[in-house]
Amino acid sequence: MKPILLQGQERSIMQIKYNREGELLFTVAKDPSGEVLVNVKEHSQQINDIQLSRDMTMFVTASKDNTAKLFDSKTLEDQKTFWTEHLVNSAALSPNYDHVVLGGGQEAMDVTTTSTRIGKFEARFFHLTFEEEFGRVKGHLGPINSVAFHPNGKSYSSGGEGGYVHIH
């Protein structure tokens, strides 16, 4: 099979995801160029991550605007917003429960001037329906860049700026 090259982005592509049928390709890039089929501008700053739910009916985005947002995959309507004090680098939806986990913290370039307590280098769990935070897990010594639930939904992992992956 000959690869298809999609051009148009002038800066880094941060994430790509397919829907279950392979008909749609979601991209997150550092610039607004490229062929835009639908543009959803619910975040006020750069989107760092996009992850689809297991059944592909919704997706969650993580942004430098200190939020993660839940969207309906068909209508692209903003359904929920999860707020934090610091930027959100990654967000993931639980395959088993109405939970979303967020990872982030302060900017990596500011880490050396701050203690881990102030930097908020912890995974944060929110209830999907009520948008309320119900738990935090500490352990990273710098910003969390990626979070993911295990496919069985019984654990999650987080990867941080320090180069470590924490499996919980």
Image (cartoon, rainbow, N blue to C red):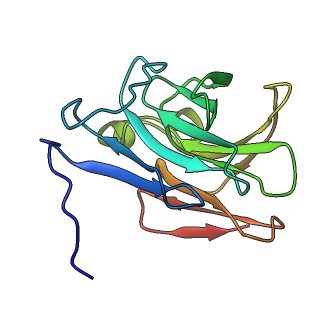
Relative height, residue 108 to residue 43 (above, below):
below
Q: In this orientation, which residue lies closer to the viewer: 106 or 71?
A: 71
Q: Is residue 3 left or right of residue 61?
A: left
- Which picture quadrant has residue 150? bottom right
- Which picture quadrant has residue 107? top left
Q: Residue at x 60, y 29 (%)?
A: 69
Q: Is residue 70 left or right of residue 18?
A: right
Q: In this orientation, which residue lies closer to the viewer: 86 or 115?
A: 86
Q: Residue at x 80, y 44 (%)?
A: 99
Q: Please provide percent x and percent y for residue 13.
A: 27, 49
Q: Please provide percent x and percent y for residue 59.
A: 61, 42
Q: Is the N terminus in the top left, top right, bottom left or bottom right quadrant?
A: bottom left
* Numbered marks: total: 0
Farthest residue, direction bottom: 1
Q: Residue at x 22, y 73 (%)?
A: 3
Q: Please provide percent x and percent y for residue 154.
A: 84, 67
Q: Is residue 50 left or right of residue 28?
A: right
Relative height, residue 98 to residue 94 (above, below):
above
Q: Is residue 140 visible?
A: no
Q: Residue at x 46, y 32 (%)?
A: 63
Q: Is residue 57 left or right of residue 110?
A: right
Q: Is residue 109 visible?
A: yes
- Which picture quadrant has residue 83? top right
Relative height, residue 29 to residue 153 (above, below):
above
Q: Is the C terminus in the top left, top right, bottom left or bottom right quadrant?
A: bottom right
